[in-house]
Amino acid sequence: MNNDLIFIFGWWLNFFFAGLINLPLTIFIFKKFRDAGYGFSKTFGSLLIAYIIFLGSITHLFGLTQTFMYAVVALVFLFNVILFFRHKDKLLSLIKKNLRIMIFQEILFTLGLILWSYVRAHQSDINGLEKFMDLGFINSILRSKYLPPPDMWFSGKPINYYWFGHFWVAVVTKFSGIPSYITYNLMLATILGFTLTGAFSIASTLVKALNLKINKRAVLAAGIISAILLSFAGNFHTPIYILKEGRDKYWYPDATRFIGYNPETNDKTIHEFPIYSFVVSDLHAHLINLPFVLLYIALLYNFLTNFKSFGNWKLEIGNFSKLIPLGFILGVMFMTSAWDFGNYALTTGVVLTLFTLKRKGLNFSSVFEIGVSTASILLIGLVVSLPFLLNFESIAQGIALVKARTPVWQLGVLWGFPALLTLIFGLVLLKKWPKLKKPDIFVAGLLVSSWILIFLPEVIYVKDIYIASHHRANTMFKLTYQAFVMSYLASGYIVIRSLTLLKKFFPRLLLSLFYLSIFAALLRYPFIATKSYYADLKTYRGLSGETWLENQNPDIFKAIVFLRENVKGQPVILEAPGDSYTEFNSISSYTGLPTVSGWFVHEWLWRGTSEIPQARVADITQIYTSEDPVLTKNLLKKYNVSYVIIGSFEREKYSNLIEEKFTKLGQKVFSSPTTKIYQID
C-alpha cells in the first residue's frame, strides 16, 4: 500500500507539472470557461509535449531519449513563460478570479485518480481481453529509438493500428520513471480523473454562459451532474432487467451486449460506455481518446462563442488561425482512435450548421461558411496526423448497407435516458424560441449528433474482418460510444436549464425528484459491475499488473525479467504464436521485444488478410519442429531472430518440438525448470 501511494503521488506530480507549465496557454485559450480551462490543462499540457516529441522522433530528427524529451519540456515551458509575461496582468486576474474553482478541479482530478487506483489495486492483472495488446504497444514504444514503433507481434513491421494514445502513455511513463506494468493501471485512473474534470468544465461553463440569474450552486451542480453521469452511469438495461429478473441474476456485461444476445439473433453487436471501459480496464484506443474528445468538445464551444466575426466569415489568415487548436486535437484523435475523427467531424458540421443557420438562415453564404469552416478544421487535422498516416495502412474495407436492424424496444432500453433528455430539452427549446442562447444551440448540436451516430449503424456499417453475425458490431461500438459521451455530457446542462424555467416550487420539486430517481437507476451500474469484477473490493493486491504472472507462471515471469535486464534495443525474439485473447505471447507483450508472429486475429485485422500472419505461423512451426538444422537456421535468419524461447506455451503448441538443435545454432542464456532462452549466433 505504501509503495502504491508513492507511485500515485509521483504519477500525479508528472501531470500536475505538465498542466502547470502549460497553464498560461490553457488559460489564454479558455479564458471564458468557468474554471479558465484548468480542467484541461493537464490533458493539453501533456499532449502538447507528447506531440512535439512524436514529431521529432517520427521524422528521425531526434531519438526517444531523455535529453530530447526534457528539451521539449523546456521549450514548452519557455513558450508559456513568454506568453505569461506578455499577458501577465490579464492572466493573473483570471487566475485570481477562478482560483477556488481551479482548486476544486484539482481536488476532483485527484479524487478520480485515487479512487480508481484503489479499485484497480483489487484486481490489477494486465491479463485478459485486450490488455496484452495495449501493454505491448506501450512497451514497444518505450524500447523504440524512433517512431513508428515496431509491432511486438509482427517483427520487421511497424504497428499498424492507432497507437498515438499509447505513445502518450509511454511518454508520461518515461518521465515518471515508474514501470509500465504499474503506469498501465495508473493511466486508467488518470483518464477517470480527466473525464470528471473535463465534463465538469464543459457543463458548468455552458450553464454559466446563459447569463441568467443562476446562482453559483446551480452552475456547480450542472458540472457535477455531467461529471458523475458521464464517468459512472450506465443505461436503462440495468434497472429494467434488475426489476425483471432480480439483482442476483444480473450480469453487468449484458448492458453492453444486448442487441443480438437477448433475445439471441444473428446480429451480435457491441454498445459499450465509459464506466464499463473503466471496470474491465482495457487501456484501449477509445478509452485513451476520451480526454481528447472532451478537450475537442470544449474547444469547439470555445471557438463558436469567442469568434466574434463568425457570422461574417472572411477568408483571412487570422480567422483560419482560430481553427488551429480544433484541427490539432482532431488530428491527434485520428492517430489515437481514427473512428473519432469521423465522429467529431460530423459533430463539428452539425454544430456549425445550427449556429450558422440561427444567425444567418439558409442561404449560399451560410452553406459556404459551414463548408469552409468544417473543411479547414479537417484539413488542419489531416496535416497534424500526416506523419502518422504516412506510416499507416487503412484496415477498413469500405462501407456497406447493414444486414440487420435493431428492434425499437431495444433501442429504447439502451437509449431511453438520452431520449428523455432530448424530449425535455426539446420542450425547453420550444419555450425559449426564438430567443435561444449559444449554449442552447451547442447542446442541441451535441444531441443531434448523438442521434445521428445512434441511427447510422441501423443503415450502414464499415466492413472489416468480423463474421456476418458481428458485421456491424464494431461500427455500432465506435459510433454509439461517442453518442453516449455527448448525450450524457449534456445532462447537467439540460437538468439545470429545465429546472430554471419552472418558476413554481412544486413543479420544480417534482421534476427534481424525477431526475433523482433516474440518476439513482443509472448509477446502480458501477456498484454492480465493480462488485462483480473486483470481488467486492475485499482483497487489496497492489497496482502491479504483473503479479498474477509471477504467481501463476513464475518461469515465464523470470524469463521476462531476464530479457528486460539483459537485452537492449529491440532484437527479434521467437515465441509460439497464439490465438487472440489467450496468455500466449506474454513475453513480447511484457517486454516490448518483437516476436515473429503473435495474436493471430489481431494481426489478421491489422494486416488486412489472414494469409499474411498464416505464412509466418507456418514458418514458426518449421523452426520449432523441423529436424533439419539448415532449414531452421535459414528461417531464423529470414526473420532476423536473436532469441528463441522454449517454454510451456511452446511445448503446449508443438508436441513434437525439437530443442536439441538450438544448442548448435546458439547458446543457452537463460534456464529455469520449464523455460529456456537460446541466443542465436
Image: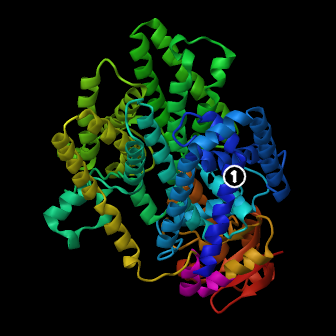
Q: Is 174 rendered above or below residue 46?
A: below
In the picture, which quadrant includes the N terminus?
bottom right
On screen, residue 432 versus residue 559, left or right, reads: left
Q: Main secondary structure of the magenta part?
A: helix
- Give the magenta part as a residue range: 544-558
Closer-to-camera residue (282/7):
7
Closer-to-camera residue (179/468):
179
Please provide percent x and percent y for residue 526: 35, 63
Q: Residues within 10 Å of mark 1 (few under 14, many from 20)?
A: many
Q: Which residue is mark 1?
A: 18
Please provide percent x and percent y for residue 635: 72, 66
* In the image, residue 276 lies in the stretch drawn in magenta: no
On screen, residue 349 versus residue 535, left or right, reads: right
Q: Residue at x 69, y 64 (%)?
A: 594
Q: Residue at x 49, y 18 (%)?
A: 370
Please provide percent x and percent y for residue 172: 68, 58
Please provide percent x and percent y for residue 595: 67, 66
Q: Residue at x 41, y 82 (%)?
A: 538
Q: Is 267 rendered above or below residue 630?
A: above
Looking at numbered disc 1 in the image, what kind of residue is underneath it? Ala
Q: Residue at x 51, y 57 (%)?
A: 108
